[in-house]
Image (tube, rainbow, N blue to C red):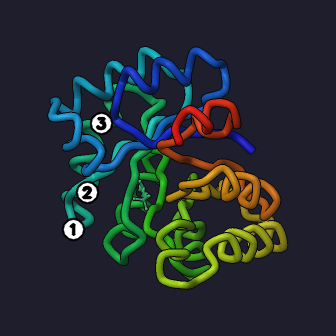
Amino acid sequence: MKLFIDTANVDHIREIASWGVLSGVTTNPSLVAREGRDFMAVLREILAIVDGPISAEVVSTQADDMVTEARQYYELSHNIVIKLPATAEGLKACSRLTGQGVKTNLTLIFNPNQALLCARAGATFVSPFVGRLDDISTDGIQLVRDIAEIFTYHGITTEIIAASIRTPGQVVAAAKAGAHIAYSGRIRPLIPVESVHLL
Ligand code: G3P
């Protein structure tokens, strides 16, 4: 299982990338807003640090606008992956962008049917929200397991990103459940001695 970091903090990305463990980066509008910086400038800096998929999320809600927004990000680099919500409009945008050779990460996945629809629309990645499901007394890791079983059974090549991961235990559980990738804003606690320092 690969590890992506979920942050728009360039210093944090640079530090974890220096360990040689990062395969990619995910961002979202909240994370970008937290940094108070121009998004395009942040994306350029991340692209210079990490040679792998960098997810940039659209804020539009309609497919036409999502595609227009996506093209701006994608022109920066072919390492840019367009993060789209797993809504009907997001599926439309996914299908169109896939047809243009643009990679996508379909986010806000809360059930296996959403993941299947996204895969059929051509998604490169799907992001089931493990932590958010656990928040509402649902088993987020079971969702990862279900999607992995369905994708394996049907030969679907869309990669599963276990998202909204918050604890080292969830990283292990995601790996055992068949996730291809786990992303978290907290990579440092995966090393126990470092965790002790955080307590
Ligand atoms: O990209 C979405 C992810 O950051 C959500 O994580 O911990 O806020 O559920 P969390």
Callout 2 touching callout 1 (CB < 8 Å): yes
Badge 2 element: helix
Q: Mark 2 to mark 1: distance in Å?
A: 6 Å
Q: Disc 3 designates what residue? A: 73
Q: Give the number of the disc on residue 62.
A: 1
Q: Earlier in the sequence, mark 3 or mark 2?
A: 2
Q: Disc 2 designates what residue? A: 66
Please, is residue 196 above or below residue 103 in the view?
A: above
* Residue 149, picture quadrant: bottom right
Taking the image as four quarters, which one is ligand 1 found in?
bottom left
The percent position of residue 155, horizontal first and vertical second, equals: 80, 65
Instruction: Write the residue at 59% across / 66% down.
Output: 119
Mark 1, Cα crowd under 10 Å, few <14 / some 14-19 / many 20+, is: some
The percent position of residue 198, horizontal first and vertical second, equals: 52, 37
For the N terminus, the quadrant is: top right
Please, is residue 46 above or below residue 145 in the view?
A: above
Let me know if residue 101 appears in the view: no
Nearest the eye: 4 or 97: 4
Let me know if residue 54 appears in the view: yes
